[in-house]
Amino acid sequence: MSKKSSAFLMSVLALLMVNSGSVAHAMGPKHPKPELATVPFVDLNRYLGRWYEISSFPQKFAKGCTGTRATYTLNHDGSVAVLNECNLNSLDGKLKQAKGKAVVVDRESNSKLKVSFFWPFYGDYWIVDLGANYEYAVVGAPDRDYLWILSRTTSMNETTYNEILERLTAKGFDVSRLEKMVQP
């Protein structure tokens, strides 16, 4: 191999190495987030029942929803039946329902679940904050692209809400993305 050919080959290899490193860097996380901490323990029997959405990150599947609420009941196999409901475009609008199933993936804490509305696809449902009396719950995903603040009532005390926002900010959520839900 001539000197010219060898130099050209080395240049091409160097360029490929630089570009592959750039591609790998570009594909990797720009700002990796620390692991999302969940609450230490959830008593599933206390968690069951009706929850009202106070605010959430907007999602396409919830477009036009008002008065959003979720009801959780225990199935015979230990999974949790999920019924999400909302009224479209107004509190008097047409009822929209979605039925799903949640399974606990961390039996030690019961705070990490997977939920599915379209089998076999499951999404993370992690309980990251919870009121001492189960009066509110905050559910998110480890990538922090999903977030719901839920309450047992259709409204939440502003002080409590702001304290939750502070804790969520410390956990790496962009709380500026939250949109409040219209409730009766």
Image (cartoon, rainbow, N blue to C red):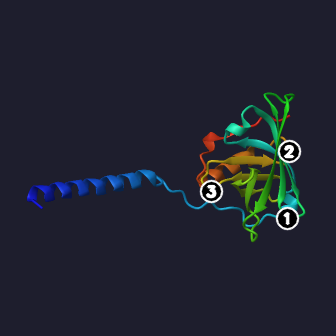
Q: Residue at x 88, y 59 (%)?
A: 74
Q: Residue at x 73, y 52 (%)?
A: 138
Q: Is residue 183 left or right of residue 139?
A: right
- Residue pointed to by mark 1: 78
Counting from the top left corner in percent of width and height, residue 77 is at: 86, 64
Q: Is residue 31 left or right of residue 21?
A: right
Label 1 or label 3, whichever comes before in sequence order: 1
Which residue type carries mark 1?
A: Gly
Which residue type carries mark 3?
A: Pro
Judge depth for marks 3 and 2 and give the one in front. 3
Judge depth for marks 1 and 3 and give the one in front. 1
| Residue 13 seen in the current view | yes
Seen as rendered, the residue at the extreme left is 3
Counting from the top left corner in percent of width and height, residue 105 is at: 73, 65
Label 2 or label 1, whichever comes before in sequence order: 1
- Residue pointed to by mark 2: 153
Image-quadrant location for residue 67: top right
Label at residue 142: 3
Label at residue 160: none
Q: Quadrant of the N terminus?
A: bottom left
Q: Which of 166 and 86 is in front in this view?
A: 86
Q: In which quarter of the image is the C terminus?
A: top right
- What's the CA distance linking mark 2 and mark 1? 26 Å
- What's the CA distance linking mark 3 and mark 2? 26 Å
Q: Is residue 63 above or below residue 43?
A: above
Q: Residue at x 40, y 55 (%)?
A: 24
Counting from the top left corner in percent of width and height, residue 92 is at: 87, 28
Element on which disc 2 rests: loop
Element on which disc 3 rests: loop
Q: Do the residues labelled 3 and 2 touch (CB within 8 Å)?
A: no
- What's the CA distance linking mark 1 and mark 3? 24 Å
Counting from the top left corner in percent of width and height, residue 157 is at: 79, 44
